[in-house]
Amino acid sequence: MNNFEFLSGSFLFNGLNKEELSRLLRDNEPRISSYKRGELIYSSASSERLVGFVLSGGCEVRRERGSCGSVLLNMLERGDSFGILSVFSDGDFPTRIYAARSSEILFFTDSQIRSFIDASPEVNHNLISFLAGRIAFLNKKIATFSGNRVEDRLAAFLLCEADKYSSDVFPFNYVKCGEEINAGRASVYRAVNALCEAGLISVSEKQVNILDPKGLGGIGSI
């Protein structure tokens, strides 16, 4: 698959025909850079605002914690993107992108992204839809930390994970979950058992299966 085909399948250019995409890219060719495992790919603290698309390999999204090092927030695979918010903000976000393995990244500058927005209603619509989705995701993440009961926070966390994996069946780790919802391992075990007994989830072989997503979203009643 060439870069043109890759971009035509990305969220940003979804719905554009070949002629429209060719016109947008004619004066805005992307930059492609290669990185070795462990190399820093992008930081919002850099002087250049960039939006990246993972062409190959994989990346880690890490939050810096000063002298305590960093914590892994997310993994990015082929087709995933980062840096969109930097187009609209001058703030320095405390996240960094590192190569988890040898990777190729396709970059557009913030000025190129703005030119796409100005030139194409479809790109504008795609970007708004993407940002709306991110807002919905972040609202669910907020719910993960705002619930009074461990069961509430666990349910919110599991629903966020289901969105991330685009599946009701996904990997589950008690330690990671406890860190995410600010609960001890024993409390996580009890909460998992409560949700299993309620028929909302099942757990086996280090993975979770959400049996009743609607019910999981309203566990305040159990």
Image (spheres, grey):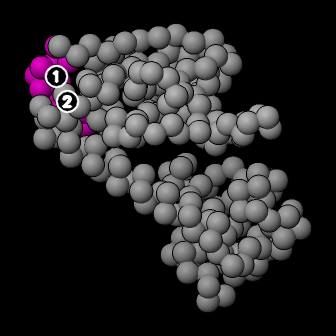
Q: Is residue 100 left or right of residue 53?
A: right
- Amino acid type of the residue tagged 2 in the rendering: Phe
User: Regarding mark 1 in the picture, which secondary structure is present there?
Assistant: helix
User: What x and y, as percent, mark residue 165?
Assistant: 55, 48
**Figure quadrant of residue 70:** top right
Q: Quadrant of the C terminus?
A: bottom right
**Figure quadrant of residue 202:** bottom right
- Amino acid type of the residue tagged 1 in the rendering: Leu
Q: Is residue 40 left or right of residue 31?
A: right
Residue 37 sits above or below residue 197 on the image: above
Membership of 71 in magenta stretch = no
Q: Pointers 2 and 1 in contact (CB under 8 A)?
A: yes
Query: Which residue is painted at 34% across and 35% down in the image?
Result: 87
Residue 62 sits above or below residue 37 on the image: below
Residue 24 circle label: 1
Dot 2 alpha-carbon crowd within 10 angstroms: few under 14, some 14 to 19, many 20 or more: many
In the image, which residues are magenta? 13-26
Q: Earlier in the sequence, mark 2 or mark 1?
A: 1
User: What x and y, as percent, mark residue 199?
Assistant: 67, 78
- Of residue 125 and residue 112, the one placed in the foreground of this image is 112
Main SS class of the magenta portion in the image: helix
Label 2 vs label 1: CA separation? Answer: 6 Å
Query: Which residue is painted at 50% across and 57% down in the image?
Result: 138
Q: Quadrant of the N terminus?
A: top left
Query: Which residue is painted at 46% across and 33% down in the image?
Result: 82
**Figure quadrant of residue 126:** top left
The answer to whether residue 219 shows anywhere in this view is yes
